[in-house]
Image (spheres, rainbow, N blue to C red):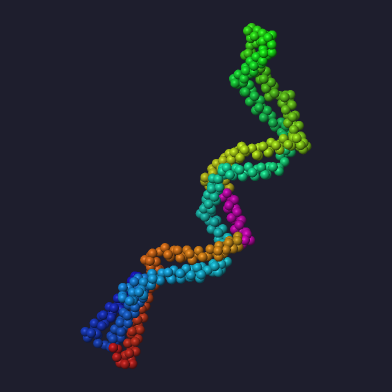
Amino acid sequence: MKKRIGLISLLVAVSGLIIIFSGIQFGLLKNPIWYIVLAGFEAGTIGGLADWFAVSALFREIPIPYIRKHTNIIVKNRQKLTLGVVDLVANKWLSPETIKEKISGLTIAENILQTILEPQNKNRAIDFLRDILNRFADNLDKPELAAILQKILKDQIGGIDLATPLGHWLENTIKKGEHYPLWEMILDTAHRTINDNSTRYAISGIVNKAARDYAEQGILKKFLVWAAETTGALDEQVVINKIVAAMNEFIYEAKNNPNHSVRQHFDNSILNFAQNLIKGDTNSHNIVNNLKKKIVENTEGQQIIQDILSKFKTTVKDELKSNNTNFMSLLTKYLTEFLLELQKDKPNQQKIDNWLKENIIQLVTKYHVEIGNMVKSSLERLKDFELVSQIEEKVGDDLQYIRLNGAVVGGFAGIVIAILKLIFTSKII
């Protein structure tokens, strides 16, 4: 209805003009008042037509000779209109001073906190953090990171005294017998190794070599070896069994006796080394420092670090798969606690506000020209008919009232003029 109100008002004026004029011409309307009404409809028609032309000329070309060049105003003045809009938006409505004044009155941090603490927004914040951590985890096993960590490890460990703490640890371990499980593991491994067929084969080779070497020392010794093998006095399997049995017996005694001489001798050697480390013995410290240096600078050290990072990456990625993992539950808890604490901390909110405002104002000042460029590029992308359609869509209804007003005001003016003519001249026409 609003889009046709201008047309309806013009049709009413034209219809009234035709009806009243016809009535007067055919003698149906003889009272002088009808001449005043006719003048009103006549002026209303003129006003309606004039405003129809004015409104239509804004949006489209009117095919009337000579006059047509002054129609289609928006399209023909598009460049000027664009520059005017850009200037209005960038330098008036959104000038740096206006934005600064508006921002200065905002409580940005408080509003952000209130928004984030809403359940749906907090979940989005958690998802955002998880996405960042996932991206970070994707690069955990990169060789470059392993090289950096190896360098950091080298720099940090290089100045740390590991010898003295190692000495205290070794001393306590030996005195408390905490190393006994290590002895049991070593001796169990030795037992399995001694009774393995490959070990018996190796012993057989040693026995044969020893017999051959002995025989090579002279004719008599060669004869004795030959005689022993021939008579069965030198049975290889018997010798191997004896050796294996003796070694098993030794292992059994050492395993079940913490005070075994071999174990005691080894423990005392370690204990002595530990005490030298505690006392600051130069040679003992050099052994640890050289070992530390070789471990850190070893070319395989970077690969070890990278393997550790790969496993760590897998663990992190698993923990980031959903919000129900231990890590994500802990992250959610800490984030919520942090936001709630910050919500109560007005001084820190003010600091955040000041920092945000300063940076926003700097960005607006630095990139203010982009506001105008954005508006300009948006307008320039529109085709002529799109620009006209958008403007007409926004203001077209209001312009219809201009046409209505033209008809009404014109009609009223026509009636007033007709009355004045009647008063002063006693004539309407």
Q: Is residue 338 visible?
A: yes
Image height check: is 17 above or below 227? below
Displayed quadrant of residue 117: bottom right
Which residue: 62% across, 20% down? 202
21 with respect to 211 (left or right): left
Q: Which residues are magenta?
A: 331-351
Residue situated in front as seen by the camera: 93 or 31: 93
Q: Is residue 342 magenta?
A: yes
In percent of width and height, residue 61 lies at 34, 71
Which residue: 55% across, 41% down? 314
Q: Quadrant of the C terminus?
A: bottom left
Which residue: 34% across, 78% down? 50
Q: Quadrant of the N terminus?
A: bottom left
Q: How many marks?
A: 0
In percent of width and height, residue 128 lies at 53, 52
Residue situated in front as seen by the camera: 337 or 20: 20
Q: Main secondary structure of the magenta part?
A: helix
In percent of width and height, residue 220 lies at 69, 8
In percent of width and height, residue 324 lies at 53, 45
Image height check: is 222 above or below 278? above
Q: Is residue 241 visible?
A: no
The furthest residue to the bottom = 425
Displayed quadrant of residue 270: top right
The furthest residue to the left = 26
Q: Is residue 356 magenta?
A: no
Which residue: 51% across, 65% down? 369
Image height check: is 153 above or below 409? above
Residue situated in front as seen by the camera: 274 or 382: 382
